[in-house]
Amino acid sequence: MLRALYDYAIKHELVLPPGFAYKTIKAYISLDKNGKFIGIVMGNDEPVLCPDIGSLANGKDKCNILVEKKQIVMGNADNIKKQFFYQVLKEGSTTIPEFGICEDLNYQKSETKNIIEEMERYKIKDADRVSFMVGGRRIVELSEVKKWWEDYRVRFQKTEEKEKARCLITGEKIVPMETVPPITGLAVVGGHARGDALICFDKPAYQSYGMKKSTNAPVAEEAIFAVKMALDRLLIDAPILANMKFVHWYEKPLEKDKDPFESDDFLGNDFLEEGTDTKFDDIFTNTKETEQNAKKQADDLVTSIVSGKKTVELKNYYTILLLSGVNGRVMVRYYEQGSYELLQKNIFLWEQQLELLDITGNQNVKPYKLNARLLRLLSKQRSEKNIFERVKKELSGVTQNIITAIIHGTPLPDVIAVRSLAYIRSQMLEISGENERQKIPDAIACQWLKVWLLRKDKESKIMSYYNPKHKSVAYHCGAAMAMHATIQNYAMAGVNANIVQRFYASGSRTPALVLAKLNELSEYHFQKIKSEWLKNELKIQLNEIYVAIGDVIPVTLTLEGQAYFALGYRQMCAELQHRRNERMKK
């Protein structure tokens, strides 16, 4: 994983010189060549390459130089970090005269007062980074700074001879870094705003074979800074998935619309983020040669699986990381590398297996992002103040298994079926509002069940539409219950507690007992239907379903049977609506 990130940084030219980091600067204190304060020059959001002393800045007596927080640069005289800041400027003034001009400001109380007042006028906060300009030039961007800092920073390193070890990233013999720079970008998924440690050995339990701290995982300073730059960049736009950042890239870059992870049936082009003000049921929305040839070759390879036609071998690979922050450390939840060809094939399989007719029976359910699909693995509750907190607590572990299953085309864990069925039951038990149409199992929850069944049983042929010849008795039991609910709906529309609310939960587990009761009720409901044609049509359809069930109705259903029951119910509802639509066209 470290090598993959290192290679990414090298390829994208992200590697920084040791002891430097990109930072945004809020404002510059502008001085003339005589040290007189001219005014405040506001910075912008563009990062500037600055000297950085790393974790030493977290101590009590040191800070970063040239660029620091306002509360340090313009703080009280007895501030130890402020004293250190200006002492470094004084020592550096022998090499860079502009440093001395800035350092003299520390003794000019009247100028300091003017600067503070001007900063307040510009609403510059204590935590904002500030720096200096001398004669219209930013001191951090002076050409002499890089060479001076390379020489000066040596004094912060211990001079005693250290034992060398082989770098885990490059394989070269190096003196290991004692502490590695923090990774930023994980604050929204449990990390700290100041960053999290990717490699950390601060407790005896993390030390092995008598090795202490960095000797457990030796890395070169240049290499680990490259890894940091790669992660910092990748995490900026990485979407959130169940309290984890989803980071991915390709060996050969792809345009966003050609990235299979960005398809509407997988991650989507944008993600639902925490903090959005949305209700549970309203949370879903529709959603050159650098790499043009890579996509074409991938599509040819997928087609060749069916056609048998030989194609050019694809040479592109993906890398995936799921990351979160835990107690100041970077937690790698998932790491995966593989071929783009297989990825395309398995994403295509995933999208194909998700196909399910919507309630009209005329077209497939619209695509949803994976984040939206995850919400259907939570049992439905009447009040959802922060649904994403439930996603964090309940689904962070299972999400990794889902990603693995999608990428490799492997079975989904059984907990997917358990959670989907729980959602459907809670949904179907809700009391219908006035004039609400007949309840049907949720489309996304049924899509989860469909994929779970298809991958659990390779012989199972579940179509996107109702299949009257399906081999599962449980499937037709669900269809029978949907038919009984439809009969009641024709006979007694708008009833407060209908068959669905009263019998769905028990019917999906013990169909023999419930269907016997529903048959009795349907006889009563048939008497309420005035249209003889409609009555006969419904009886014919009901008889067809019971013929498909056969002689024996199961007393109880397994988890697999309950999944078939839900799918049969939903697909029969879609089939009945499709038939109504066709009749209306005539």
Image: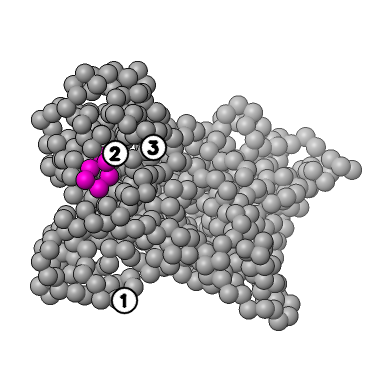
Name the residue rendered at 78%, 43% in the picture.
580
Q: Are marks 3 and 1 in contact (CB under 8 Å)?
A: no
361 shown above or below 176: above
Name the front one of labels 3 and 1.
3
- Kindly identify the residue that appears in the image at 70 percent across and 37 percent down: 490
Q: Which mark is residue 137?
A: 3
Q: Residue tagged by mark 2?
A: 98
User: Within 10 angstroms of label 3, few (less than 14), some, or many (20 or more) residues?
Assistant: some
Cα separation, mark 2 vs mark 1, equals 42 Å
Q: Is residue 194 visible?
A: yes
| Label 3, label 2: how far apart the Cα atoms are | 9 Å
Residue 86 screen position, x and y as percent: 19, 37
Name which of mark 3 and mark 2 comes first in the sequence.
2
First in residue order: circle 2 vs circle 1: 2
Circle 3: element type: strand
Mark 3 in CB contact with mark 2 (< 8 angstroms): yes
Q: Are marks 2 and 1 in contact (CB under 8 Å)?
A: no
The residue furthest front is 34
Under mark 3, the amino acid is: Arg
Lower position in the chain sequence, tag 3 or tag 1? 3
Amino acid type at image mark 2? Glu
- Residue occupied by mark 1: 171
User: Observer-nearest residue: 261 or 509?
Assistant: 261
Magenta residue check for 103: no
Q: Amino acid at mark 1?
A: Gly
